[in-house]
Amino acid sequence: MSGQPPTDLQYTAEHEWYAAGAPATVGITDVAADALGDIVYLELPAVGAVVAAGAVVGEIESTKSVSELFSPVSGTVVEVNQAAIDDPAVVNADPYGAGWLLKVDVSGTGALLSATEYAALAAR
Amino acid sequence: MTDQHSPLHDEHVALGATMTPFAGWLMPLRYSSDIAEHIAVRTAAGLFDLSHMGEIAVHGPDAAAFLDHALVGAISQVKPMRAKYTMICAPDGGIIDDLVVYRVADDELMVVANASNAATVYDELAGRTAGFTVGLRDDSATTALIAVQGPRAAQILRATAGLAEDAAISGGTAFDELRYYACLRMRFEGQPVLVGRTGYTGEDGYEVWIEAERAPVLWRALLAAGEPFGLVPAGLAARDSLRLEAGMPLYGNELDRTTTPFDAGLGRVVALDKPVLVGPPDFVGRAALAARAQAAPERVLVGLVGETRRAARHGYPVLSGPDEGATVVGTVTSGAPSPTLGHPVAMAYVTPDVAAEGTRLAVDVRGRAEPVHVVPLPFYRRPR
């Protein structure tokens, strides 16, 4: 079902993606979105929240299951995707684009995987 | 152990299904979107592969009397070509499985068991045959089961190429007169199939049993006939959310060996006073179930509606309220955001003192108490 992960992003083993920048952008991969099924509810941290790499910062709930959102980076949340909160189906439809979740002012990163490393992990 | 493949496995792969291991089988979880499949069943129709279910033929002069002894229901009172929801219990009254029994002839009944319990049910039945002139045959491996569920189901079966009535084999009923929990034999491309007006979605619908090797042709014929009516293939994810909205118990969630039919609010399926035609005077589990019928329940199965968006899930604790210091009063057995209703729903066992409709409780959803209140089951009833 899932395609190859975009090569310009970095990834976590928990199926988040991370786009470096000021601010950086965080979302979940299409592997995660497909595994969850139709996403119906997102719980994301508040703007201004301080997040730590590897810590649980939110929840992603589908009809069938629920999964925790782990932050790939440490820093301060500067924006959350209100459009995705209002209509979480966008995360299924476009997980690397319109379905992004957080923008973060980054103070440090955790262990991140390249697209190749992530694709190998996701294929297991 | 490798998961068994359904006779329709190649159809699912061709349709792009996400497959999932389930009770020793590899079955379709979803084809596209869980919610779209769920809504299609509520508004048009869905096509389900249920070939993982177990089919056990019980035949011989004492077939019905034997099932009176082996199961909790009054099976000998089921008329030919009618079906009954029933259970097989252990001597202590615990539920071994919930079943639908179809009386396909005077002296033959088909027992449909959950996939996870099919082998156990066969063994339990085989261990209860002493004194009866009866034979058992496990047809599970050679039988496919395809369900068409939803308000358009009857129109779709009527429009299916190759599916035809034949009064010579039907068992006495015309398709248009087939009642809920009844069955008839039809022909598909000349060969007999069994069609039951039964299901597990809360909608009108049919279940069709066919020899495994002929199943793919029937599957494609149903899909083609159903397309103009909005039929879509639907997976186990939709099946679970549909049955939950309809308040139907799932073995392993609401029902298990530590639960009696009375705990589950299904005491009506236990025929304590059914007449004994042949064999031992009591059916298996009768003494324990008779005692249980008289006793005050320790727990009650209730419906819960969530007042926030975070859904209660299987295994979460039910609390006496949302505040600090609340006590645990029960456990969630099934829960999900309801696609039809737009809010979370759950079934839970709670203590009787908090089981009244309208009682305000909470569920510990991963460390946070979410407010819920008790509602009558089912959550959803189809318009008639």
Image (spheres, rainbow, N blue to C red):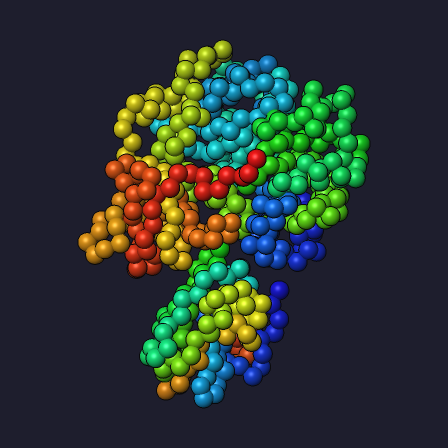
Q: Position of residue B366 (x, y in %)?
A: 34, 59
Residue sitting at x 61%, y 41%: B150
Q: Quadrant of the C terminus of chain B?
A: top right
Location of residue B375 (image quadrant):
top left
- In-image side of B225 versus B93 (left or right): right
Residue sitting at x 30%, y 43%: B359
Which residue ends up furthest to the left in the rendered image? B325
Q: Is residue A112 visible?
A: no
**Count of marks placed on residues:** 0
On screen, A29 above or below B9? below
Q: Is residue B68 visible?
A: yes
On screen, A67 above or below B113? below
Q: Position of residue B213 (x, y in %)?
A: 72, 40
Residue sitting at x 62%, y 55%: B31
On screen, A109 above or below B236? below
Q: Position of residue B100 (x, y in %)?
A: 54, 30
Which residue ends up furthest to the bottom in the rendered image? A22
On screen, A30 above or below B246? below
Residue sitting at x 44%, y 65%: A42
- In-image side of B205 versus A75 (left or right): right
Location of residue A75 (image quadrant):
bottom left
Q: Position of residue B202 (x, y in %)?
A: 54, 39
- In-image side of B112 versus B184 (left or right): left
